[in-house]
Image (tube, rainbow, N blue to C red):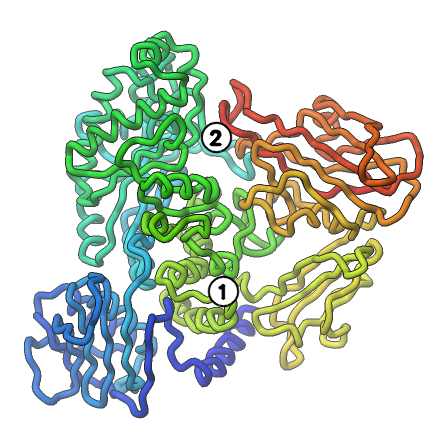
Amino acid sequence: MAKRITLLLLLLCISAFSQSPLALIPQPQSIKINKGFFVINKKTVIQADPNMFEAQFLQQAIIEQTGMKLKIVPAASKVSKICLSHSVDEIQSDNSESYKLTISKTTIVIAAEQNEGLFNGIQTLLQIIPFEKKQKISLPRLKIYDQPKYAWRGMHLDVSRHFFPVDFVKKYIDYLVMYKFNTFHWHLTDDQGWRIEIKKYPKLTDVGAWRNGSMIGHYNDKTYDDIHYGGFYTQEEIKDIVSYATQRHITIVPEIEMPGHSRAALAAYPEYSCAGGPFEVAKRWGGFEDVFCPKEETFTFLEDILTEVMELFPSQYIHVGGDECPKTRWKNCPNCQSIIKENGLKDEHELQSYFVQRIEKFINSKGKKLIGWDEILEGGLAPNATVMSWRGTEGGITAAKQHHFVIMSPGSYCYFDHYQGDPKSEPLAIGGYTTVEKVYSYNPTPSELNAEEATYILGAQANVWTEYINTPQNVEYMIFPRMLALSEVLWGTSNPTNFPDFQTRMIQQFPTFDKKNINYSKAIFEVTSNVNPSLNGENVLFTLKSAYGSKGIHFTIDGSIPNINSEIYDTPILINQSETVRAAYFENNKQQSAVIEQSFFWNKATGKKITLVNQPHQNYSNGGAFTLVDGIQANRSKIGRDWLGFLGKDMDATIDLGKEMFVNKVKVSVLSSEGSWIYYPTGIEVLISNDGQNFQSIKHVSLAEIQEDKGNVIVEIEPQNAQYIKVIANNMGTITEGNPGAGSAAWLFVDEIGVE
């Protein structure tokens, strides 16, 4: 099967090349292709300062791609040459990353005012040069003018949950370089491990870098191994990585978590907690109630740490986390309550603001700037802080309106630890469903901002949290090819209305991945599906598509495995009963994709009109309200696309059966995954009506009953006729003390609502 897919990919690439001779990602701002070619051969030289890193990088990359070693010379006459130039008379831009690439008959010129621009131009040229061993290569003559839209084009990597060696961190930086990212957000500390050597506090790595086991399987399984696990980067290793990144024009922004997510640090130095310990480095995922206590000794401790961190990283920004900080210990800590009283603070939220502002003043005193996750807005934002908005776009919008700089990173578009294909065939992930196409549809600048406010959006980044990503190969699988979509979004040349063009260019990158031994997801080649209501509101329409096109899809509904003789898909499949659809893509009489399978479970609510009082959170809103009546039962072990998530809000749904029907049972599927802050509803109420206005409550199910049913709740009601069924599932609201996420809004996850 793999060989078949590779062959078809090559055929697709050849076909697409005739339509798009330059499969560049990100697409340049301006490109003009001329007639004729420039030929690279062993006599071609690179005209540049031989000591310039950019020239050396280009030389080495051409060796890797073609096998030809081109000489670097300070000057060349009429010979075939690639010229790196700071002559920018034709570039009308003050953007330090802008460049001009010209390929003529005898010369390639990459011109830019700054070396950052030259380096960007080099990446474009390397995508034009084929990755094949030849002694002569023809390149099309062209002119490209190019510059990025966003200043912050980032990728994040969590090395706390799982540790990755120095060689892979450098390789990760190489991946960013390939697609013109410029920022590497390095998440170095968390509850599950402290990964950076701090010389003044050696126990941070002697103790905090190691845990006595890790979760295996999904959080809900609550199973652990007993393997002593860990690792850390010495300061010398960090200096080496920072130097490596700096040469390649990648800024590394370190993250040192505070005041929450500090269990590993407190295991080493429990005296900086409220309770005093002892603590162990966390084995389970998620957050913990023991956090830094905002007393003077703690600030001294953290300032000492940050001093060493800032000496290692030249970045103007230092990330301090600030997210998911439970307030339970602070509420019961005499020292914390004294600080609240002495400083005239309202509550523990303002105490967190006090904490962050203290740290920000120190960071500013060292000539640096503070970044935190959007929770730092709670209780009042530190005066000069930059906000990284992850819980959606709301935090970023609020910060920008207050004239604070913002990096957008909403989970619905930018969390690359989410599933990217059908969860049934994907490696275990934390949840969510973020496809390449969805990433490509993202616009980092919210429409709610006016022109002035929009200038505070620095850019965006993708986050790679590694609870369920434990090897370098797994990291590669989760970022490729989604990071290509984000790169074009951040460069400012994405066009969601023409996703097929991007998809074609993206597929043409895959042979390069193969040659570089990059492990990438091929979910894009799966037959994918979507469900929608029929026009009459009585049935479900099941839509199939493939990156190859839909004409080659064959499917069955009789339980058999599809083959070349099975029914050809040409219009959405009408579902009006319980059945299982199986489908695959075929070309040249051969199966070219895995078989997908989707079962439908029919009931009186399936396909009917449904309305919601509260809309699901954008991170978990795939399919909208119709997800609750589409006949598909969500996977309880893989929290993917078939769940709707309500953050801090009740689910209040009304189903219109279309006419009065005899009903005696309502089924509701809800989920509990406390490590992800997903909790069962505190109760479920069923109401009925025949006019859609006046509802009668007929049954209430308690939390105890929901727990007993393990989330598959069957509500038996007195048999009667009704046209409208209302189901209200009550969100926990604020997570109670002693539970993961205490003090934060709870998630309520709901899937199918059935009526019998």
| Residue 653 horizontal/vertical position (percent) | 72, 39
- Circle 1 residue: 496
Residue at 47% across / 33% down in the picture?
Answer: 285
| Residue 588 horizontal/vertical position (percent) | 63, 81
Residue 412 in sight from this viewpoint: yes
* Tag 2 secondary structure: loop
Q: Which mark is residue 284?
A: 2
Q: Is residue 221 above or below residue 432?
A: above
Depth check: give the residue in front, 201 or 126: 126
* Tag 1 secondary structure: helix
Give the residue type at disc 1.
Answer: Pro
In this image, 107 relative to 686: left or right? left
Residue 221 in sight from this viewpoint: no
Tell me the quadrant of the picture where the C terminus can be found: top right
The part of the image, by quadrant, that contains residue 530 is: bottom right
Q: In this view, does 204 lie above or below 433?
A: above
Q: How crowded is mark 1: few (under 14 residues within 10 Å), some or many (20 or more)?
A: some
Residue at 48% across / 51% down in the picture?
Answer: 413
Mark earlier in primary sequence (1, 2): 2
The part of the image, by quadrant, that contains residue 267 is: top left
Depth check: give the residue in front, 511 or 550: 550
Q: How crowded is mark 2: few (under 14 residues within 10 Å), some or many (20 or more)?
A: many
| Residue 204 horizontal/vertical position (percent) | 27, 27
Give the residue type at disc 2.
Answer: Arg
